[in-house]
Image (cartoon, rainbow, N blue to C red):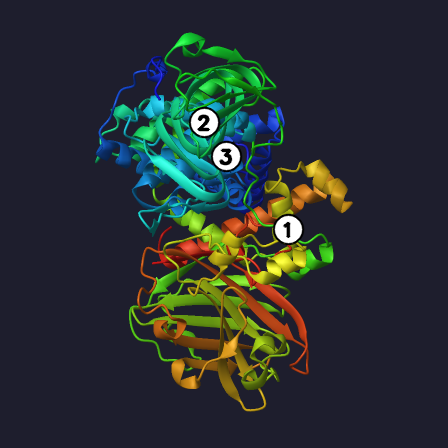
Amino acid sequence: MTAENNHLPRPWADLRLDRLIDAAAEGDLPADDAAELARCLAADPDARRRYVDWMLLDHSIDEELSAAGVADMVDMLGGQRPASMVPGRWWRLAAIIAIGLVLAAGTLGGGIVTLEAVRASVGLSRREPLAEVSRVRLAVPATKGGKQAAAIRKGRLIGAERIAIASGAIELTLASGCMIVLEGPGEVELVSPNETVLHQGVIVVRCAEGVVVSVDTPTAWISCSGGEFAAKVDQSLSTDVQVYEGDVVARGGAKTGSGQFPERIAPRQGRRFSARPDSSPETIAFSPERFTRRVPDGTGIGMESELENEKTGRPRLESLVVARASEPLTIDGDLSDWKDAVWFRGTLSAAEWVEGAMLHDADHLYVAAKVGDPLPMRNSVDPQFDAPLVWQGGGLQIFLSGDRATGWPADANGPSYYVNRKIEAPFAERLKAENPRLVTLVMTHHAATNTDRLCLGRAPGFTATELPTSSFSGRFVRRPDGRGYTLEYAIPWTTLGFADDPPQSGDTLATAWELHLSDETGRLWRNQIIEIRNQKEPPGIFLFERAATWGRANFR
Amino acid sequence: MRSDHTTADLNPAVPVIANDALDAFARELARSQPRLRGLIRCLLFDRQDVEDVWQDTNVTLLKKAADFRPGTDFWAWASQVARYQVLTHCKKIKRDRLVLAEDLIQQIAAEVIDRGGQLDDRRDALAACLARLPRTQRQLLEMRYGPKNSIEAIAESLDRSAGSIRQALFRIRGTLLACIEKRLATEGVA
């Protein structure tokens, strides 16, 4: 291995080398040992290969288990994962901006100036995005010509265009680094990274010191060089301006007299510019709570109790691959023909685990699971009578979105989400929850009749009802050792109501797996394994409460 | 209404590169991130140095985006930039921290760069091996790598000695490495 280790038995020398490398990877290598390691590496190509293997392992574990990857770093900044979350052709630019947000600035707090820096670095033309939607809260896009506009999602890149919301609020991060909060109903138009037109509604603008931004309204022009102000355009087109801090000047639309000249508006002051051409600005009272200045992050609300949080499991995986089945599958519980599948594993204990996979083709969703369960296939809840409770007796429950327009994460909160947290359900959220393409499937083996069953529930409540056996194929098979089972189901897209637009290769949709385990009676729920869950969502939210908790199903 | 005083002129004039080239560049840059960071990790002992150089490398690549020609070997170009950044960084820090000698950096970099796409295979294999790791071992790794706990902090929280934690992590890494090599050999990648 090395000159100095040549006299040693080979395994010992290998072990010594591994220890030196491991200490180097840990940053714990004393100078003498570092010199020894350097000599080993310089002299022996095998040692270099081993060193590279070990360091790459350390790097890969770090990538796998920490938030060190680029996408995660971007997430820390409140950005988006480039490939998975930013749809369409903009993902490439999002990748650059996302990387640039972290890398060009060098610090997490540098987001204010980094978009501009990245733009400068890569030479984006003025037709390219001017802003990114950085936060969204209960935002419903306004209708255009009687048609509902596309959903406004976090991470969406916006060019020189109008953006309008009917309710809720969004926060835009401009390429200049300024932030704009638009409160619905409202409409803004981005002109450049430093120029915005407020057509209607309320915006709050904040910029770092020295960054100049201007806002035009139908009746006023406002400019700020660092600071924060609000502007409101009401039905009469008059403009209220309120300054929180910083250096703000404004002028109205007066054509004559002193109203033509811009005036400075000091912090904690307000002005109203009316639509009358001969009017001078009026002083209005400053009201700090009048407008929405920050958009809260859109993640869900967990339960207060740790016990409740524990019930929602400790899932480790966020995504699974739904490969395309290259040949028809025989639904017999024998999974040897699942050659195209990409399996994942969730574990509760040595005896309680699930290995799962999904496949798809033009007509079907296929589901397979190998389950470790010391009390398998005892479900005594008859779905004919008690379908909503059938999960209690054990089986597999899958949540799935067929809503390509929403993509991932799915967006719907069931009634119980609000009930359990004792909060009001906004009307817009109730509308979103009525989404027939969000479903749950509960696959069970009814022990008394020795039949394999399927129940289907839909948003918003996901209350399951049993499906006739003619509408699917399913099979449970007990493991020879009696400590688990396999299940295999083929569920036509028609059964799910997705046949008009079934998921296709390339889609990223939402899904989550929940394996239910029962006691020996097959009636009382004893535990569960949840996997494929959105890691950004806090614990303490049940899958049936909030579709945003579901993980990603990457259809290939 | 529009102001007479536009602020558009505040934007710096920037070189414009073709959209196709920009697409290709962004795609390659995003795809190369794990490999780039892996390469830098192999050349520097200190994890914070790795983060710094990784960032510097990306900033340099972004600045040189206009130099990239679609169809050329992005990895070869990017890895050269990374290697140069490592050497520059080592010159800055060598008085304070242990660094590899320049010729050794070149040798090791060549080893990593030659592996190319194999690095992705190793990462995929690791994911499978991690999934098969006993829960307690996985938890220990998560404590070390997740919130970047020091070994001493982990030892204190588990009421064990730092040496025993080091030893346990060493064994887990050895197990994972053996698992990866076995998987790659089975799949005919290694």
- Residue linked to disc 1: B139
* Quarter of the figure with residue A228: top right
Q: Residue at x 38, y 50 (%)?
A: B190
Q: Amino acid at mark 2?
A: Ser
Q: Which residue occupies the foreground of this view, B57 or A273? A: A273
Mark 2 sits on what residue?
Answer: A238
Residue found at x 35% / y 22%: B1
Chain name for mark 2:
A
Q: Quadrant of residue A258?
A: top left
Percent coordinates x, y for residue A506 in the rendering: 32, 55
Q: Give the percent coordinates (x, y) of residue A373.
A: 61, 74
The quarter of the displayed image where residue A80 is located: top left
The 10 Å Cα crowd at callout 1, few under 14, some 14 to 19, many 20 or more, is: few
Same-subunit check for callouts 3 and 2: yes
* Amino acid identity at mark 1: Gln
Q: Nearer the viewer, mark 3 or mark 1?
A: 1
**In terms of depth relative to the viewer, which is nearer, A129 or A225?**
A225
* Residue A2: mark: 3
Task: Find numbered disc 3 in the image and state the secondary structure of the residue it sits on.
Answer: loop
* Disc 3 to disc 2, C-alpha distance: 82 Å
* Side (left or right) of B91 relative to A506: right
Residue at mark 1: chain: B
Q: CA distance from mark 2 to mark 1?
A: 60 Å
Which amino acid, by three-letter code, is at mark 3?
Answer: Thr
Mark 3 neighbour class, 10 Å CA radius: few under 14, some 14 to 19, many 20 or more: many
Residue A553 or B84: which is nearer the viewer? A553
Question: Of label 3 and label 2, which has the lower sequence position?
Answer: 3
